[in-house]
Image: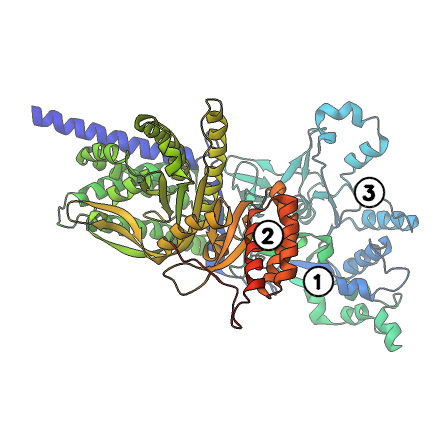
Amino acid sequence: MSGGKGKFNLLWKSSLFIIAAAFLTIILTQEIFFTFAPLKELELKLIDSRFLERGKIEIKDSADVVIVELDQESINQLTPPYNRVPLPRSIYTKLIEHLNQIGVRAIGIDVIMSNTDPLSPDEDSILFNTIKSAGNVVVAGKIDESEDFRMENLGYAMTDTSYVKKFYNYENIFFSADSSIGIVQPPADFDFVFRRYLPFRKTDITDSRVPSFGFAIINKVLNLSPFYTASVEEDFFELGNKKIPKYDRNSVLINFYGPSRTFNHIKLIDLIDDDSLITKDEVEYQSEINVWDEYLSDPEFRVKLENKIVLIGSTVPEDRDILPISFAVGTRKGDNLIYGVEFHANIIQNILWDDYLSTQSGESEIVIIVLLTIFIFAFTSYIRKFKIRIGIIIEIINLIIIALLIYSVYMISVYLFINNKLVITVVSPALAIAMAYLSSTAYHFIMERQQNVLIKGMFSQYVSKSVVNELLANPDKLKLGGERKTLTILFSDIAGFTTFAEKKEPEELVSFINEFLNEMTEIILSNGGTLDKYLGDAVMAFWGAPIAVEDHAYKACLTALQMQDKLAELRDRWSLTGETPIHIRIGINSGEVIVGNIGGENRFDYTVLGDDVNLASRLEGANKEYGTNIMISGTTYEFVKEKVLVRELDVIRVKGKTEPTTIYELISLSSDLKAIKAIDEMHEYFQGVELYRHKSFDAAMDYFKRCYDKLGDYPSKVYMKRCEYYLQNAPAADWDGVFEFKTK
């Protein structure tokens, strides 16, 4: 009875972990209450990766869509009065006439023409009538989404005639030619990549639906009315006899065929260059070329346009009609850019060929999440039952299996995408696998390792939480020994502490030091540092171990500045009780050190050793020589030079080292405007240092004196004394300007 009850309790507890893992996965991935942007963006990127795996589909010879590009070469070939931007309306008139002469099915002009032509207003009416008589032209429109066009501002809007006209024309004055207009504002995803296409847009003022540009073209091809919009069914949009699978409630996922120029492109100039148009080439070569007439009689060229859908759009970079899409030719930034007119071409071709990407239903996704969670939890729990001497191997096996399963999910998604044009989610099953593993790990951790809670509570009093977590995760690090790592080390000490301590009773001194060290320690730990030890009033800390810390040098510098700021607050508070003000000196260095548990079998500390540790300590003491508060080494400076403000103090050689070290005074963060101004005011100091290193001691001393008189700058005073010395005791001919510290 007792055993049965125990098994029931274990089953109940494990079920709670399974339910929690599945529930959390569903909440994070199904957008029931909110959209978790990082996971949403990752899912979108994984869709992009499947296009990369599939590669480009060659469709130029078979595609129904052809691009007529308004490119820079076409503009350059035009002569007055046509060579202006925007192009004269007569250019579009001629283009429509020529395209219909050769027998195209439909024409889409992906150019917003919201105002009349100020130079040739008569051409507007000619183009208007041409569009009207052609009957197969769709013009581009926009819906203004600014606050002025909101429903609540309708009353104000109606008082402005031009405003209303602009709205009801959808920002294209040729809309009313035959009311064939398509909205050219595709929606961007979270990461500002364009993958989806809206069948229609809804206006806020009239509450009417307007087809998007690609769907308006399809209306022409299927002989539907200009304002016909797709009906919204449960799983698809229905447009005439076309059933287009939904991606989400409002949009279609585009099946991109390839990168830019996947569709046939024909230059605009070639289609309008007839005997009535004189191009720059004709002027230059004094010869009539007339490319259009040649094309018209060329059967191979005619087949490129006959019965095709022609989209006219700009490929001039200055027009900025460029969109990042799912398909990329590589993995570098910018490899996924196509022109806006090509974006519309893809969805049109998708619909004409019924060549759609289908997506997985939300219900099936939830079922898969639940089943995977149960299976992975049970499987990893079963693996953990095998007890071996090196327990970590079991976790490694589990992790390898988890990684292989997640990779398998991705490869299955690639296979289904390429072979079945089915887009299944990758993030939700992958997250379900990961969550199931984590919940299984948490369950066994709680059930089998309860003593770790006690250990963690005890050790957290003495070392940082990161050290404790690392030791709990990797108990083998409790062994003696260490490893080489590049870290940043910080030493801090109270200036004149011996004299300060002599004036206090022991109990009072301990209370004072405890308050001081507590504040400094909080800053170190909050910035991801590891507290190494206290040496009386001194503090030693480092960044980068046992947990790797990004920007470890910057974190150390930030800590030093915050320590000085906190001490200033403490001084203000202590001054109210008559306490003697104290100051601290800080030294920071970065370099390769040995880090690990150092000591005997029964007593050891997690600490760092090496010359670069010693240098950090020496830099703390070197502050006394220059009257500075924070000193950093040249190595640290190279890590942080873009993020902090410093001034170069000197090139020194500390006792015990042969190589010189450039040292800097850390002043503030690079965003501190007051500090920038303060550094600018030290220009005499920097000029003096330059002269000093060129042995121009007399001139250098003059600059240092001016800086000291103006700012009371202590380093300038130090250099003044050195200049006086060298003026009386000339340095050796091979003097390199390095100052040698004789003491530690």
Give the mark, 3 or 1, whose residue is nearer the N terminus.
3
Q: Is residue 89 left or right of residue 433?
A: right
Asked whether residue 320 appears in the rendered view, the answer is yes
Give the mark, 1 or 2, whose residue is nearer the N terminus.
1
- Mark 3, mark 1: which one is toward the viewer? 3
Task: Tell me if residue 378 comes above or below residue 61 in the rendering.
Answer: above
What mark, if any, has residue 173 been given in the picture?
Answer: 3
Residue shown at the point (50%, 38%) measured from the top left: 235
- Mark 1, mark 2: which one is toward the viewer? 2
Q: Which residue is mark 2?
A: 324
Check disc 3 and give the amino acid type: Ile
| The N terminus lies in quadrant | top left
Asked whether residue 198 appears in the rendered view, the answer is no
Q: Which residue is mark 1?
A: 305
Which SS class for mark 3?
loop
Give neighbour class at mark 1: few <14, some 14-19, many 20+ (Cα, 10 Å): many
Task: Tell me if residue 3 comes above or below residue 415 in the rendering.
Answer: above
The foreground one among 317 and 341 is: 317
Check disc 1 and give the amino acid type: Leu
Mark pair 1, 2: CA separation: 28 Å
Residue shown at the point (72%, 60%) measured from the top left: 69
Q: Determine which quarter of the picture holds residue 610.
A: bottom left
Q: Position of residue 503 (x, y in %)?
A: 38, 30
